[in-house]
Amino acid sequence: MPEDLLPHLRRARDLVDREYARPLDVDELATTAGVSKYHFLRCFAATYGRTPALYLAERRIERAQDLLRATNITVTEACMLVGYASLGSFSRKFTELVGMTPSAYQAKFAADGVPRIPGCYVFMHGLSDRKPPEPAPDPGGAISEKPAGAAGS
């Protein structure tokens, strides 16, 4: 496989990583990579060791694991949030990849007593992987008129 194709395959893989929750098909991914559908399938599998469909399923299930572990949403809500239209398909793929049902997975983490994020917050704000903003640096005593050791009067 030509090495100049790798950045194009990476672009398609990045699209899957970003847009996993919406319907993605091979034609769109191949167009993103700038190659034919069949060439894309062969090259993607050779490069990443899995088909685009399996790669997409793995990303969706990983995200569902995060949701089930960290929030109090239902399995059905997690299924819909990660892009599955069918609860049966989601449960089957989850069990295949994780080794337990989504409900059992959620119950396992609920039993550990990990604090959960309310589902309403997840729906309104989403989960963020970003770091919290850094606190503003202390500008020193130029702004304060009271000495640092003075008690409030």
Image (cartoon, grey):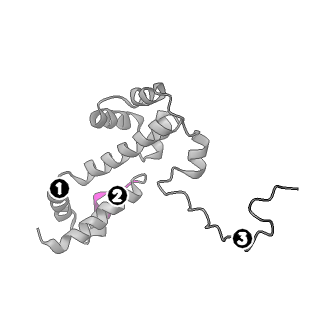
The furthest residue to the left: 1
- Quadrant assignment for the C terminus: bottom right
Badge 1 vs badge 2, beta-carbon distance below 8 Å: no
Mark 2 lies on residue: 16
Question: Element under label 3?
Answer: loop
Q: Is residue 109 above or below residue 18?
A: above
Q: Residues within 10 Å of mark 2 (few under 14, many from 20)?
A: many
Viewer-side residue, 57 vs 30: 57
Task: Left or right? Give the position of 22 relative to 126.
Answer: left
Magenta span covers which residues? 23-28
Q: Is residue 23 among the parts visible in the rendering?
A: yes
Distance, label 3 to label 1, CA atoms, is: 61 Å
Mark 1 lies on residue: 45
Mark 3 lies on residue: 141
Task: Left or right? Give the position of 29 relative to 106.
Answer: left
Residue 141, image x, y percentages: 71, 70
Residue 81, image x, y percentages: 47, 45
- Quadrant assignment for the N terminus: bottom left
